[in-house]
Image (spheres, rainbow, N blue to C red):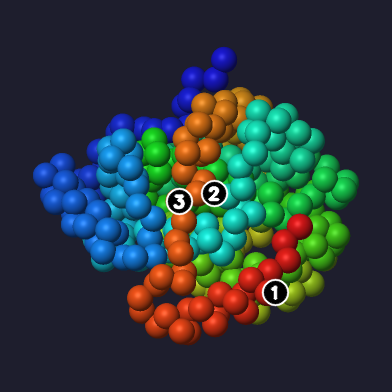
Amino acid sequence: MPEFLVIPNKYEETRLFKDYNMNKEQIKVDVSNIRKWIISQPHLPEFPESKNDEINFWIEGFLRLTKNNAEKTKLAVDNHFRLKTLFPQVYSINDLQDYVESDIYKYLTMVMLPKHTPDGLKVMYFGFDSQNTHLFRPIEIYKRMRLMLDIYQRKGIDFSGIHVVIDAKNITLTHISQFDLFQLKNLIKHAQKAYPLRLKHTHIMFPPSFIDLAKNIMKPFVSKKMFTRLTFHKNLESLWEHIPRDVLPEEYGGYNGNLDMVRAEWKMLILENQEWFLSNVNYKSDELKRLKNKKKSIAYEKSFFKNLNFD
């Protein structure tokens, strides 16, 4: 049975508290002030008293993600609820038991690996199980990522940033062609504010022959900073120069278990948190009630929803 080794790590949590100069008393003060600010915003949701402890810890997670910055935490909280309104497909919840047993779920592997790098970073792994694209849905990438990040928010943020490792050996031009790049850019823009992760590096393993074409297609829709943090690896040895082998799974020459074990843990975590996901799916922003730049916001949302067309 999975042991839930992927989260959280108390040692890494302690390191974050030290690095960000956080302490329990100040956290209580900051969380209280942020809760008061949420109440003052008419477009943000109201929470029942029964959720007080849960919401307080959730806000503390944002404080960790923003390096203990209360104002940036407010921005992240605001954008989290806005993202749920703008992209309901990413947050749609039906039967998670059926979902994790589906072929669509199994086709895509997206997990956080258990161990941290020496500097406190987590490693997110992403890959397809074959080149057969009939099971590919771009929306699945965003769904899986947000499921993982929301579980971390609930269980405890214990990392200062992430490496992303993408195994590209099964990626085809058909995969690339299915992305709506304008919507992708819009989603990335909002998601970066809603989940203020610090992306250390993106590693593309075994890049296909058409990688230069794919780069040119994606370049206008991805920030220059993200491109400067992108490395292509034709072999495992060059990956090991960035990520220690004791952090990587056996499939990538590492010493830290295998991907089947990590997949099983994340599957169990998603199911373990099903009730929590269901209880929070409807807490989102009401953009019509947003105070600042109300007319501009309404016009933008109408235009955005009119053009939204996810699979």
Q: How far apart are labels 1 and 2 at the CA level?
A: 23 Å
Query: Looking at the rendering, which quadrant does residue 215 occupy?
Result: bottom right
Q: Residue at x 25, y 54 (%)?
A: 35
SS at circle 2: helix
Give the label on residue 283, or none: 3
Q: Residue at x 64, y 71 (%)?
A: 305
- Look at label 3 and name its amino acid: Tyr
Residue type, label 1: Asn
Distance, label 1 to label 3, CA atoms, is: 24 Å
Q: Secondary structure at mark 3?
A: loop
Provide the residue designation for mark 2: 146
Residue 158 on image: x %, y %: 36, 41
Q: Secondary structure at mark 1?
A: helix
The residue sitting at the left extreme is 25
Task: Give, as a three-letter code, the residue at label 2.
Answer: Arg
Which residue occupies the foreground of this view, 265 or 214? 265
Please report whichever mark, 1 or 3, sits nearer to the chain's N-terminal start: 3
Do callouts 1 and 2 mark residues in contact (Cβ within 8 Å)? no
How many neighbours does mark 1 have within 10 angstroms: few (below 14), some (14-19), or many (20 or more)? few
Front: mark 1 or 2: 1
